[in-house]
Amino acid sequence: MKKLGRILCLATLIVTLTASICFGAEGLQIVEAYPEDGQKNTTIENMCVKLWFNHEMGDKESVKANKDCFKLTDDEGKEIPIRVFYHPDDTKQVLVLADTTKKLDIKDNTDYTMTVSADLMDNDGHKLGKDAKYTFTTLNQGRNNAIYMVMMFVMFGGMFFFTSRQMKKQQEGEQKEHQVKEEAFNPYKEAKRTGKSVQEVIAAHEKEQAKKAAKQAKKAAKNAVDEVEYEEIEDNGNYRVKGPRPISASGSTFITGRKAEAEARKAEEERLARRRAANAKGKKKK
């Protein structure tokens, strides 16, 4: 029994050592890349490729050994200057960045290829074994600009259309409101609506119209300026007012505040007189 137990322990140890050796001998592989192979519309500014491996990278020996294992080329095979960075926290990540400290000619809508050499080595000396290539296409800036301009045109066109439509509706509403306000005053209809007598309605309306006319005349008077005539006194060069003169004397058609107020009052009185006559005529017919 003891002999059998020793044999089983030895067999278990052999299997364990074999599995460890096989696992440790697993080759270096790229498990993920960005941009992916065949990806479109990649950025032109700060062009870079991120690579993730299954083994740790970035010790002194591997950095030195991998110095020339990364290459970035355009669609004509022209090599783009690059810089390689190893992530300090994620030791399985490597960043290959276009070297912006040098003159670059990165074009839009162009294919670029990242080539990783088969000689790439991890910290334990495992090699990639075969070249890996990732081809991606940069952004088509000309087409994107055209799309952007079309979108801007459509947006501004829509804004103009809706703004014009809203202004038109507003003008139509104001016109309707003005038409309602300009409707002829009907004392009988107003009397029926308010429950007052026709005389009371007419008196109230006349008072309101007179108030409006006075308000308009007052406003016109504030903006009016009477012209005066000046005469120069030759002996001392001073000026004095010769006398008031109507503004119409200078050829202007501007109406002064006092005249505007008088004309407005006269027009309102004539209108009210005509309305009284019409009301009286209507009563006689009834």
Image (cartoon, rainbow, N blue to C red):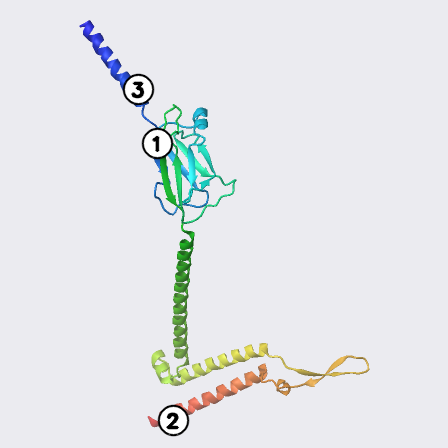
* Marker disc for residue 281: 2
- The residue mark sitting in front, 3 or 1, is 1
Above or below residue 148? Residue 250 is below
Residue type at numbered disc 3? Ile
Question: Which mark is drawn over residue 30?
Answer: none
The percent position of residue 283, horizontal first and vertical second, equals 36, 92
Q: Which residue is mark 1?
A: 130
Mark 3 vs 1, N-terminal side: 3
Indicate the secondary structure of the residue bearing disc 2. helix
Select label 2 or label 1 by which is in front: 1
Q: Position of residue 36 (x, y in %)?
A: 35, 40
Q: Badge 3 local density, few (<14 within 10 Å), some, or many (20+)?
A: few
- Of residue 286 and residue 73, the one placed in the foreground of this image is 73
Could you say where residue 246 lies in the image, as x and y percent from the top left?
Answer: 63, 86
What amino acid is found at the position of numbered circle 2 in the picture?
Lys
> Which residue is the site of mark 3?
21
Question: How far apart are the two marked residues, 2 and 3, measured between alpha carbons?
Answer: 124 Å
Instruction: Using the numbered discs, state the Cα–Cα distance from disc 2 to disc 1 in whole angstroms.
Output: 114 Å
The amino acid marked with disc number 1 is: Lys
> Quadrant of residue 25 in the image?
top left
Locate residue 250 relative to residue 122 in the image: left or right. right
The nearer-to-camera label among 2 and 3 is 3
